[in-house]
Image (cartoon, grey):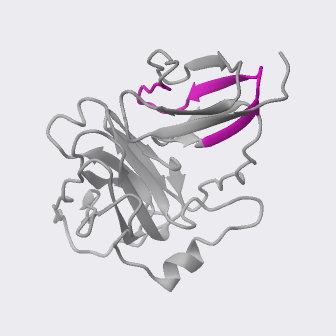
Amino acid sequence: MTTRRLLVLLLASAAAIGGGLAGNSSAGAREAAAPAAGGIDPRAGGFEIALGEWAISPEARAIRPGPVTLVIRNRGTFRHGLELELRRVDDHDHDHDGHGDDDDDAKSIKLSPGQATRLTLNLAPGVYEIECFISHHDDRGMRGVLEVRADAPLLAPPKPAVGTTVAISGFAYKPATLRTTVGKVVTWRNDDAAPHTASAAGFSSPTLAKGGTYRRRFTRAGTFAYVCALHPGMRGKVIVAAGGGR
């Protein structure tokens, strides 16, 4: 009876972000991932996994077993690939299939910068290691753990994009567009494991490690577009309207 089984994402139809994402879909996956009372199942609408230098950022650290559509995005500047390895089976929640100690080994295609794909899987309960299989990328930090368990917590509904804080998470600025008024201070906060910046023509943050923040007061109206100097595919903007005070 196996205690280690390799499940790998076959990313056979990668597509550029912004274009159609190729992949499988099923009514069962959509039904299983429907929002539940008191929270949102992170599988709903696709479970996001972002790849970049040098981290893997899943939408949540734990999900419930069953059908799930993984949405894998390469937001880095190098090619990356993703594999899932089942490290521990939860014997209480899963009946083994009795196939012995065989390991099924496979690898995803390499995703070019800006590419993404979808893949629908049926994940059994257990503890999975997720990592980039490109040589030495896992050693540089592109690895993590995803738990699949029946009591995985649901996510709180997203809050409206109000206030003056931009969270950096999943290799993206949230909100991507922030509206404020002259005189207000905008704060960027890095919630990712990977370092990031907020860099524009007129300003630039230092490199922000996880938990780091950068603040800037906007003293004139206008639209200020910015990017991450380390991951140029990350883009955001601040729209400043007149009428604010210091």
40 in the magenta segment: no
When the figure is inspected, residue 204 is found, relative to residue 44, above or below; the finding is above
Asked whether, in this view, residue 12 is left or right of residue 90, the answer is left
Asked whether, in this view, residue 188 is left or right of residue 98, the answer is right
When the figure is inspected, residue 104 is found, relative to residue 203, above or below; the finding is below
Percent of width and height locating residue 152 = 59, 55
Percent of width and height locating residue 163 = 77, 34
Percent of width and height locating residue 223 = 62, 35
Residue 229 seen in the current view: yes
Of 43 and 145, which appears nearest the observer?
Answer: 43
Residue at the location (18% across, 58% down)?
Answer: 107
178 in the magenta segment: yes
Image quarter where the N terminus lies is bottom left
Residue at the location (71% across, 18% down)?
Answer: 219
Magenta residues? 177-200
Name the residue at the bottom extreme: 27
Of 61 and 161, which appears nearest the observer?
Answer: 161
Which image quadrant for residue 174?
Answer: top right
Percent of width and height locating residue 108 = 21, 59
Residue at the location (16% across, 66% down)?
Answer: 102
Residue 89 seen in the current view: no
Asked whether, in this view, residue 244 is left or right of residue 180, the answer is right
Of 131 and 229, which appears nearest the observer?
Answer: 229
Residue at the location (37% across, 67% down)?
Answer: 118
